[in-house]
């Protein structure tokens, strides 16, 4: 066995190098997946020990050098990934506020994001927690009606607001806002209770932010509605002008990548700059004979790419795309192959060193996964033979390129479908068709027309070009809606088990990074995991972390029955997503096995060959201990928003406040008698704020750094 592995590694050659990025990402993912510091330390000790043992054995007998070097390198890469994300969490992680609070805040505006499509404005504020004075960063939302002159980056304002700590997942498998806030420096989110008072207007020095907002405002003034919102996004990074229905249609049609400034947008800008220099500079022989054209073109392309990144706000996806573009330009300047697994691995390691937390997010996985799928497809021998240059008519050449465009879109869709299902519980099934139309429309018509319109605006004759650009962006939105209106266009499934998802990722990495027939060994786990995703069964009962609601998935999984209507759109969406996207949401009172009074509700559910009785206590009026004991004795599951002090022993689980404070939301599979909790995926990571730990671990009376906080407001 070691001999066969040695021969395999020798034959693989430089294809071994990209696996170091996989090892680094594995260490990061393991830190998120393991529960506590003792397990993290054990992983580091195991990795370093394995590397040392492999190198010591190689030094002693010299056999299997490639295998032992591979073991040592991968082990050290895993250790480096774990140490990197642990170190960043410890050094830069931001503790949230202890509890919800409201008060008057004196704050400095760090960033502003307009969302006219949703009628609100988002402000990133540096302020202090009322009473304790701890400096924090707060994401505050206020309606457009509360906007005031001078309310921009750098302004000092006074505002009355309600603040909440960033919330953990409402249910198992849900989005973890608390984790994202921990790494992004946010201690709270909130909403304004009254219009802010601008004490010190924004200074005139923040020219870049003012240019970005002015550009977005100009575009939205020329193109109203969602078309203008998408156009404004392309030049400023502000996506708030897109109507929610149109944004959802874009996501369901597989066009969500167009709503994030990433590789397509930045690559098109950089490629245009590079090609202009390569084509135009030879027209000046005095320069063309004295400079290396690829070096000059790459340098100008790099400057344009960095400028576009800064203009559009420098979000993570844009920075990641810029890093990739700079590596491609460097390879072109040096005369090297710019596209390949090695270059992709270098770019991935660069991103992970700066933002290790991105590894467990959908943006990192989908962007690098799509590029890896494209690279692996073009390295396959049948594809290389199909694309090889040959004497043929221009019509056949264009036909082959169109076939490849469809094939690339199909491969990307198939590769990213399980990723979308895992993170969002929904995915578009006709993304290849939509992208076949949308990408050329965007790259060759919408973006160039918008650039030309902005240019012609300078001489006062941009109106006709704006009209054409508006038609192009309207066509893009129409493509999204036509795609999602097709039968079965959107797959909505419950979140698959993390183990299945890891098997899929491992299979796809094996399939994408190796060459030759050995890569086909990655196909079985990827296919089996995908089939498991498609046949995943939703949980039977969902219990949010506050214990105030209960959701029952109907037998046909097409209805979700709730004790009461969720108070927020976010809670409603979280329940529907966790249940696998039922078509309707009804009240539990319509379920035949439900009976309710002022004190409690009893729900009878037939699953797994038996009848389950669920008792939901409303909290008022008070129930005597003897009556509570009798009610619990006849129930399999008891749910209560308050802590139960009296005798209550149900057959399966007592989900009262005492339990839910430790576990978070619950998902119950009655057929397999399995209970999943939010805490299962959180462990002892510092952002997990089970309510029973909030006061002890994140007290708001700790001193803090005053460097980026607004000055104290006297009454605070």
Image (spheres, grey):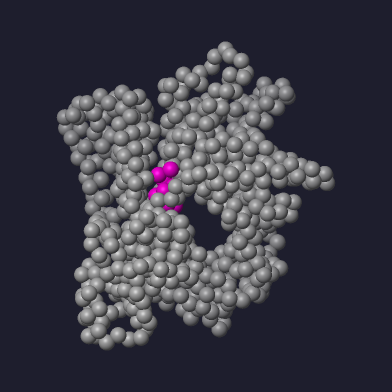
| Residue 231 point in image, percent of width and height | 66, 48
Most frequent secondary structure within the magenta stretch: helix
Reply above or below: 559 against 249.
below
At horizontal 46% and vertical 69% (from top left) the residue drawn is 565
Q: Residue at x 63, y 59 (%)?
A: 117
Whether residue 144 is in magenta: the answer is no
- Would residue 15 be found to the left or right of residue 329 on screen? left
Count of all numbered marks drawn on residues in the image: 0
Please tell me which residue lies in front, 399 or 513. Answer: 399
* Place of residue 428 in the rendered image (x, y in percent of width and height, measured from the top left): 49, 45
Side of 490 relative to 710 (left or right):
left
Residue placed at 60% from the left, 43% from the top?
A: 479
Residue 634 locus on image (x, y percent):
22, 74
Q: Which sits in the foreground, 93 or 629?
A: 629
Question: In the rendered structure, which segment of residues is drawn in magenta?
Answer: 417-425
Furthest toward the top, the residue is: 391
In terms of image quadrants, where is residue 585?
Answer: bottom left
Q: Nearer the viewer, residue 157 or 411?
A: 411
Q: Is residue 483 visible?
A: yes
Residue at the image position 39 percent from the left and 33 percent from the top: 512
Q: Quadrant of the N terminus?
A: top left
Residue 490, above or below 141: above
């Amino acid at each position: 066995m070691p001999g066969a592995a040695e021969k395999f590694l020798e034959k693989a050659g430089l294809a071994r190098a990209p696996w170091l990025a996989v090892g680094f990402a594995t260490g990061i993912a393991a830190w998120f997946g393991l529960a506590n510091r003792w397990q993290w330390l054990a992983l580091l000790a195991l990795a370093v020990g394995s590397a040392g043992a492999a190198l010591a054995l190689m030094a002693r007998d010299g056999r299997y050098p490639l295998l032992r070097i591979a073991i040592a390198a991968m082990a050290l890469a895993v250790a480096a990934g774990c140490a990197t994300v642990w170190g960043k969490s410890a050094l830069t992680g931001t503790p949230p506020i202890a509890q919800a609070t409201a008060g008057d805040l004196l704050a400095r505006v760090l960033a502003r994001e307009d969302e006219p499509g949703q009628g609100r404005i988002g402000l990133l504020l540096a302020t202090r927690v009322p009473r304790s004075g701890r400096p924090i960063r707060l994401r505050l939302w206020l309606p457009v009606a509360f906007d005031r002159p001078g309310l921009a980056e750098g302004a000092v304002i006074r505002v009355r607001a309600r603040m909440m700590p960033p919330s953990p997942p409402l249910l198992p498998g849900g989005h973890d806002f608390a984790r994202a806030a921990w790494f992004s420096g946010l201690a709270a989110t909130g909403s304004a209770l009254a219009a802010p008072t601008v004490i010190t207007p924004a200074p005139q020095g923040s020219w870049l932010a003012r240019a970005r907002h002015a550009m977005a405002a100009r575009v939205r003034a020329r193109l109203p509605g969602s078309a203008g919102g998408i156009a404004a996004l392309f030049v400023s990074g502000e996506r708030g002008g897109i109507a929610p229905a149109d944004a959802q249609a874009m996501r369901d049609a597989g066009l969500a990548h167009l709503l994030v400034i990433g590789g397509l947008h930045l690559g098109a800008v950089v490629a245009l700059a590079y090609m202009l220099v390569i084509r135009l500079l030879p027209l000046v022989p005095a320069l063309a004979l004295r400079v290396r054209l690829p070096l000059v073109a790459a340098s100008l392309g790099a400057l344009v790419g960095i400028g576009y990144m800064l203009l559009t706000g420098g979000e993570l996806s844009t920075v990641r795309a810029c890093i990739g573009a700079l590596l491609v330009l460097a390879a072109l300047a040096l005369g090297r192959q710019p596209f390949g697994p090695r270059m992709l691995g270098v770019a991935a390691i660069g991103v992970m060193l700066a933002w290790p937390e991105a590894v467990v997010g959908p943006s990192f996985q989908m962007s690098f996964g799509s590029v890896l799928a494209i690279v692996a497809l073009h390295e396959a021998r049948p594809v290389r033979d199909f694309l090889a240059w040959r004497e043929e008519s221009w019509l056949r050449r264009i036909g082959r390129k169109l076939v490849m465009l469809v094939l690339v879109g199909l491969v990307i869709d198939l590769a990213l479908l399980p990723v979308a299902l895992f993170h969002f519980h929904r995915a578009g099934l006709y993304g290849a068709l939509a992208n076949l139309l949308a990408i050329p429309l965007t790259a060759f018509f919408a973006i160039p027309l918008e650039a030309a319109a902005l240019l012609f605006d300078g001489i006062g004759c941009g109106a006709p070009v704006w009209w054409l650009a508006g038609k192009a962006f309207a066509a893009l939105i129409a493509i999204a809606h036509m795609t999602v209106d097709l039968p079965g266009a959107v797959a909505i499934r419950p979140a698959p088990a993390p183990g299945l998802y890891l098997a899929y990722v491992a299979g796809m990495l094996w399939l994408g990074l190796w060459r030759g027939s050995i890569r086909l060994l990655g196909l079985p786990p990827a296919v089996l995991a995908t089939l498991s995703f498609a046949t995943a069964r939703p949980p039977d009962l969902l219990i949010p972390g506050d214990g105030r609601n209960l959701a029952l998935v109907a037998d046909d999984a097409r209805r979700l029955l709730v004790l009461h209507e969720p108070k927020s759109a976010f809670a409603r969406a979280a329940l529907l997503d966790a249940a696998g996207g039922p078509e309707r949401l009804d009240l539990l009172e319509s379920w035949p096995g439900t009976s309710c009074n002022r004190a409690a509700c009893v729900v009878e559910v037939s699953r797994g060959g038996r009848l389950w009785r669920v008792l939901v206590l409303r909290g008022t009026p008070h129930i005597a201990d003897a009556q509570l004991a009798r009610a619990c004795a006849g129930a399999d599951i008891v749910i209560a928003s308050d802590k139960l002090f009296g005798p209550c022993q149900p057959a399966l689980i007592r989900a009262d406040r005492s339990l839910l404070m430790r576990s978070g939301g619950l998902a119950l599979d009655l057929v397999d008698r399995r209970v999943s909790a939010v805490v299962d995926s959180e462990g002892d990571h510092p952002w997990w704020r089970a309510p029973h730990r909030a006061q002890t671990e994140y007290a708001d009376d700790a001193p803090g750094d005053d460097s980026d906080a607004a000055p104290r407001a006297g009454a605070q």
